[in-house]
Image (cartoon, grey):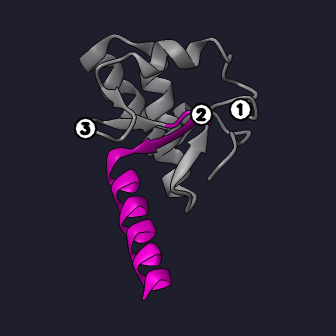
Amino acid sequence: MSLLAETPPERTDLGAAVQAWVLRKTGSKRLARALALAARAEMEGHACVRLGPAGEHWPAGDLSELAAHPWISDGSRISAGVLTDQGDCFLWRNWQHEACVAKALHARRLA
């Protein structure tokens, strides 16, 4: 998991591309920023970005609005992003990868 770094997502090529594309498709600045931060976290080798209380550039009240967006889910359906109760924001593929790893570890523990 990545906490928000000092470099804004719009200052990285991938972050800028994701942010611009999501904003163009949805008109949601919050969603565009969240997915850009998740993409940047992936570039830095993390599975997700923490948007909750530890995310200094993310107001706590905005998480409920983000969670309600159709492009965000709790992981129970396919979506562009997954937001956990703790404020961790994943790109869908990273959420799926983490779920597969967790399932494999659980199976190994039971074996």
First-in-chain label (2 vs 1): 1
Quarter of the image with the C terminus in it: bottom left
How many numbered marks have been drawn onto this rendered protein structure?
3
Q: Which residue is mark 1?
A: 55
Q: Which residue is mark 2?
A: 87
Left or right of 89 in this view: 18: left
Residue at 42% x, 70% y: name it.
101
Crowding near pointer 1: few (<14 within 10 Å), some, many (20+)? some
Q: Disc 2 and disc 3: Cα gap in Å?
A: 18 Å
Could you say which is closer to the camera, residue 47 or residue 36? 47
Residue at 56% x, 20% y: name it.
63
Pick out the residue farthest to the bottom.
111
The three-letter amino acid code for the residue at tag 3 is: Arg
The three-letter amino acid code for the residue at tag 1 is: Gly
First-in-chain label (2 vs 3): 3
Q: Which residue is mark 3?
A: 77
Question: Magenta part of the protein: which range?
Answer: 84-111
Could you say which is closer to the camera, residue 13 or residue 86? 86
